[in-house]
Amino acid sequence: MARQIADGTDDPKNRERLMKIACTCDRVPEHPPETLLEALQAFFFIHVVRYIEYSTLGIGIRFDKLFGPFYENDLENGSITEAEALTLLQLLWVKVHELGLIYSPTLTAAYGGVASLQAITLGGVDKFGLDVTNKMTYLVLETAKIMRTPEPTIVMRYHDGTPDELLLAATDCIKSGIGYPSFFNDRAILPMLEGWDVPMDDARDYAVTGCVYLEIPGKNMARRAYGAMILPLALWYAMNQGLHPLTGEQAGAGTPDPLSFKSADDLMNAYLEQCNFFFKRHCRIENICQTLYEKYLPRPYYSALLDGCIEQGKDCRKWIYPSQVSDFCVILGPSNVADSITAVKKVVFDDKTVTMQELLDALKANWKGCEKIRQLMINAPKYGNDDEYADTIAAEVHHRTAEVLAKSKNRFGYSLRGDGSGISVTYGAGAMVPATPDGRNSGDALSDATLSPGFGMDQNGPTAILKSASKISTEKTYNHLLNQKFHPSSLEGEMKNVFASYLRSWGDLDISQIQFNIVDRETLLDAQSNPEKHADLLVRVAGYSAYFVDLSKGLQDSIINRSELRFE
């Protein structure tokens, strides 16, 4: 088509431009690209066809590692300038936004304001453990600041050798308010992948798609979600002997009457028994689904792009990457569970200021007429404050829940793994969860990520949150997500270096992930009241960015209610 249009134009410059398009499309992706333009065009052709085939989320590409050599070679031979390369990336950003998905009302609550969670990965190490930062790394960050679009969201892989210059450039990008890059910690994730039997050469090449979905580019471990598990519901069933809240029928495991509990350990064990019951049921349903997908929704095009499928003569759905990296179950609300069990331990068993019966009655009444009890539960120690009392229980909830999950097997016999990709389901799922012992009301949003404290429960500043999160082992659990909201002043002027040092501290504490909203509460409230004035206001929801005015009021409220952090 470009050649046909070129034949009909009298403008020499336009004809040259169109013929360049035609020549590029003649070459790639049939032949290996030789220039940055050809490499980007080849990528987008492949990405679009893959997207058409199964319209899923994410990209899973190490952008600077892949395209950096093309860019630097073009610069060296004089075939491109930095300004021309910047224009190419801006055009690619526009093309990415031509892809989108239509969601049902239910899924809209889970994917509020999102297009299709396309993410690109920057930084990290090569197969020898050496830093891969190059000129393309910085060009992508500059493109992001200029374009200010929800997608592609950017993931920055961090390791001990990440240059200070890159951390400062990433801080500038975050300060712009677009909500990315998010940061993934090689110090935590590489040992986790190695523990899942991923060869280190492959592990070092991991990329991130969607929120926090881990992939090894070219390997048959593309994100396979086994749905999601709402952990506070498992706790609710543990406090109701597995009986359905509406019908009174036995819907969960038949755990003991909570009035017989002698300690918080009994509640923890009942919760884990409910988790085991629902994980196994959930896994059976998903195994049936995956078998049907294999039969009726093969992926021949995508399979051709992965190592091993052609060699084995098998579609990618018929076999799995040979390691313990398996299917992933999204985990929702662990902080609510941890804070609930902590509150029960403190108020009911340690201080004995409330009986179990009084607590059960208050929960059933959604705290109506029981505000004194609710305040006691709220004021109990909470995860996120570097409080050993609360953090020890939080770590136990995470570690033992992951152990229970691993007992469930996929159709290839591998253990299920957890995943922190809660997107905005934490808001949508909250509508289905009755009141919880942490003081949360029925229907309120759940904690906004696997490592995030409950709303307003973190009182000791951002570093205390990191200290609490560091007590939860990534190797014993899975890839997490941690949201933080900072006042813009925390990244301005001299504070820019402080923020970069804060990122180093996060890395040193071996926490797997972190991401930031850089916007003040007053701006969010004004945008909620006057959306026409803030049409381009981006916020970080959970693993992705979205225009604030596109979100439902409830989801907006959940972002507004996140603690606004500052460095004191």
Image: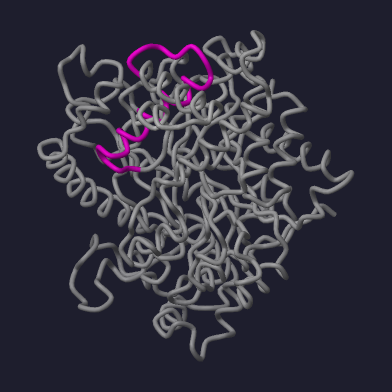
Q: Position of residue 276 (x, y in %)?
A: 29, 50
* Residue pictured at 35% horizontal, 29% vertical: 4
Front-lying residue, 45 or 551: 45
Image: 568 above or below 513: below
Front-lying residue, 373 or 337: 337
Q: Is residue 419 left or right of residue 563?
A: left
Q: Position of residue 24 (x, y in %)?
A: 43, 20
Residue 472, image quadrant: top right
* Residue pictured at 49% horizontal, 88% vertical: 368
Q: Is residue 328 left or right of residue 298?
A: right
On-image quarter of the N terminus: top left
Q: Position of residue 283 (x, y in %)?
A: 23, 46
Magenta stretch: residue 30 in it?
yes
Residue 460, image quadrant: bottom right
Q: How many marks?
A: 0
| Most distant residue in the bottom direction | 369
Q: Position of residue 131 (x, y in %)?
A: 64, 17
* Residue pictured at 36% horizontal, 64% vertical: 233
Front-lying residue, 426 or 358: 426
Q: What residue range appears in magenta?
A: 29-56
| Most distant residue in the front direction | 10
Image: 86 above or below 445: above
Image: 157 above or below 178: above
On-image quarter of the C terminus: bottom right
| Most distant residue in the left direction | 295
Magenta stretch: residue 492 in it?
no
Question: Which SS type dominates the magenta stretch?
Answer: helix
